[in-house]
Image (tube, rainbow, N blue to C red):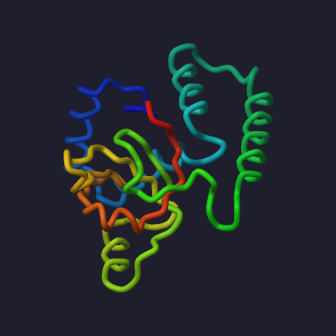
Amino acid sequence: MKVLSIEEKIADKAACKMEHSIPRIILERLVAFAEFIEVCPRGGSSWIKGFNYYCDQGSSQDHCISCVSSTLEETIEHRKNLKGDQVLTSKNLKQIKPGQKGKILKITSSGESSKRFLEMGLTPGALVQVERIAPLGDPIDIKVKGYHLSLRKEEAEHILVEVLEQEN
């Protein structure tokens, strides 16, 4: 919906059909591509808005140079905010509010729980969104790689993420 600027009803119907008619690897790649667009410095919400403008208004390369230049400046500025392996805006997944997204930086648990996280697709670099949190804070419903998962808050504390979207 967000990347292709498609109405929710149309996107939901198409996604259901696609889920049953295209190979799983292609569906997973499409989900990964949409996530990549959101986290890549050359992509992000500005790039998505540019694509929407392109769909509505047609082709124009007049702003490409300024867009690429500003993206480079923003990326350099972002890199200046890095501190070691952790970004200053990093939090554990338990601290993220519903609707916020983050890029997984690190899994701090080890052993079986770390293995379980990896099997669920919770890997460094993966985009994760908190969808809702139960009234008492447990469980936390998230979306990662197109899948919906529920985690206990104790589990979410072991997932360090870089916050990509601020609270509304």
Where on the picture, by quarter, is residue 64? top right
Foreground pick, 25 / 152: 152
Residue visible at 54% across and 31% down in the picture: 48
Residue 132 vertical placement versus 90 (above, below): above
Measured as percent of width and height from the top left, residue 57 is found at 57, 13
- 149 or 32: nearer the viewer: 149
- Seen from the viewer's position, the closer of residues 61 and 100 is 100
Q: Residue at x 41, y 68 (%)?
A: 158
- Position in image of residue 69 (x %, y %): 80, 35
Residue at figure coordinates x 30%, y 44% from the top left: 131
Q: Quadrant of the C terminus?
A: top left
Image: 95 above or below 55: below
Q: Quadrant of residue 60?
A: top right
Q: How many marks?
A: 0
The image position of residue 73, as x and y in percent, is 79, 40
Q: In the orientation shown, which residue stands out farthest toward the top?
A: 57
Q: Residue at x 27, y 44 (%)?
A: 132
Question: Quadrant of the image for the N terminus?
Answer: top left
Q: Is 165 on the left or on the right of 153, as rendered?
A: right
Quadrant of the image occupied by residue 138:
bottom left
As drawn, the residue found furthest toward the bottom would be 111
